[in-house]
Amino acid sequence: MRQQKVGQLILEEISQLFPVYFSHLTTGVLATFTVCRVSSDLSSAKIFISFFPTSQSDKMIANCNKEKKEIRHKLSEKLRHHLRKIPELKFYLDDSAEKAQKIDQLLK
C-alpha cells in the first residue's frame, strides 16, 4: 500500500517537473509518464514512459537515464516534506500502447 502511494506521488511530481526543467531531454516528442513501481524497501523506483512519435524512444530513455541524478535532485526538493529518502530512479520504455495497437490491427 505504501509503495503504491509513494509511486503515485513520484509519478505526479515527475510529470510536473519534466516540462519545466527537463524538456530538453524529450525535444520534439510527447512524453507520458505511465507507471512508477517502487521497491518494497522504497530504495528504488522504476518509471515507465511512453513517447509519441515512437521513432526516437530509445534515445529519449537513454537521455532520461543519463540525467537521472539531476532529476532525482529536483524531485527531492519537491518531496522533502513527504519522504525521508528519495528512491534511486531508473527509466524504462512503456510500449503497451504500441502492443495494443498491433493487437487491434491483428484483430481487424
Image (spheres, rainbow, N blue to C red):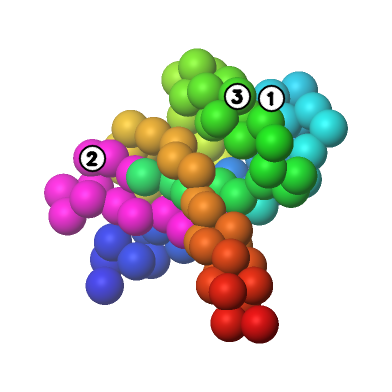
Residue drawn where x is 50% and y is 51% of the image = 94
Judge from the rendering whether residue 21 lies leftward or rightward of residue 50; answer left or right: right
Q: Is residue 22 visible?
A: no
Considering the whole magenta stretch, tell me its main secondary structure: strand
Q: Earlier in the sequence, mark 1 or mark 3?
A: 1
Q: Earlier in the sequence, mark 2 or mark 3?
A: 2
Circle 3 residue: 59
Judge from the rendering whether residue 42 lies leftward or rightward of residue 9; answer left or right: left
Instruction: Judge whether 41 appears above or below 26 on screen.
Output: below
Judge from the rendering whether residue 34 lies leftward or rightward of residue 52; answer left or right: left
The tag on residue 43 is 2
Question: Percent position (x, y) of residue 10?
Answer: 48, 51
Q: Amino acid at mark 2?
A: Ser
Identify the element where label 1 is drawn: helix
Using the image as rendered, state which of residue 25 and residue 87 is in the foreground. 25
Circle 1 residue: 25
Residue drawn where x is 42% and y is 54% of the image = 36
Distance (Cα) linking label 2 and label 3: 26 Å
Query: Exactly how many numbered labels are in the figure?
Result: 3
Residue drawn where x is 52% and y is 53% of the image = 95
Q: Amino acid at mark 3?
A: Lys
First to last magenta residue range = 33-45
Which quarter of the rendering shows the N terminus? Answer: bottom left
Instruction: Judge whether 67 appears above or below 16 on screen.
Output: above
Let me know if residue 44 is in the magenta part. yes
Closer to us: mark 1 or mark 2? 1
Question: Percent position (x, y) of residue 35?
Answer: 47, 58
